Amino acid sequence: MNNFLQTLIAEARQDTAYYVGSDLLKLAKKRYPLTRLMRLLGDGQHITTGGHPCHLCNASGATFCLSRPRGRWTFSCTGKCGKYGDQIDYLKAKFGLDDGEAIRLLSKLICP
Ligand SMILES: [Zn+2]
């Protein structure tokens, strides 16, 4: 992970006063669809709709898979972690962030 990302993650954790309006969040989600976000995070090799071992939980038998219902990419893990969802859920699962931290991080990617 590069320094820029590490800095944004640290800021997203600490800067609890940073307010993200719904318009900014909508724009950030549009600018960074899950597949693009994954590439940015160095997870491009996990972009698959066929399913492969889950890199988020590494549980044995867990399958990570992407799908695109209604034109929006989402991920899911069939294993014990059972994590699924959109870009915000991905950031939460990958970095152990809470909702607010993940929202701030995604927003800071387009508006640092
Ligand atoms: Zn998993």
Image (cartoon, rainbow, N blue to C red):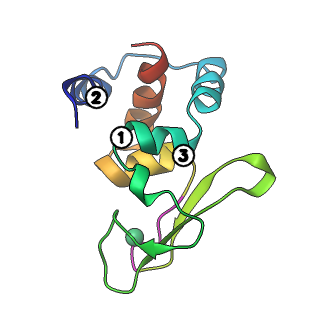
Magenta-colored span: 80-84
Tell me, yes or no, whether the two marked residues, 2 and 1, touch with CB atoms within 8 Å.
Answer: yes
Identify residue type, mark 2.
Answer: Leu
Distance from the alpha carbon under mark 2 to that under mark 3: 17 Å
Sequence order check, earlier mark of 2 and 3:
2
Q: Name the spot of residue 90 as percent of width and height, x first.
A: 45, 50
Secondary element under disc 3, as helix, strand or loop, is helix
Q: Which residue is mark 1?
A: 41
Q: Which residue is mark 2?
A: 5
Q: Nearer the viewer, mark 2 or mark 3?
A: 3
Compared to residue 58, the image places residue 73 above or below, namely: above
Sequence order check, earlier mark of 2 and 1:
2
What label sits on residue 70 in the rendered view? none
Q: Name the spot of residue 10 as percent of width and height, x first.
A: 22, 28
What label sits on residue 35 in the rendered view? 3
Identify residue type, mark 1.
Answer: Leu
Ligand 1, seen in the image, is in the quarter at: bottom left
Q: 59 and 39: which one is in front? A: 39
Tell me, yes or no, whether the two marked residues, 1 and 3, touch with CB atoms within 8 Å.
Answer: no
Distance from the alpha carbon under mark 2 to that under mark 1: 8 Å
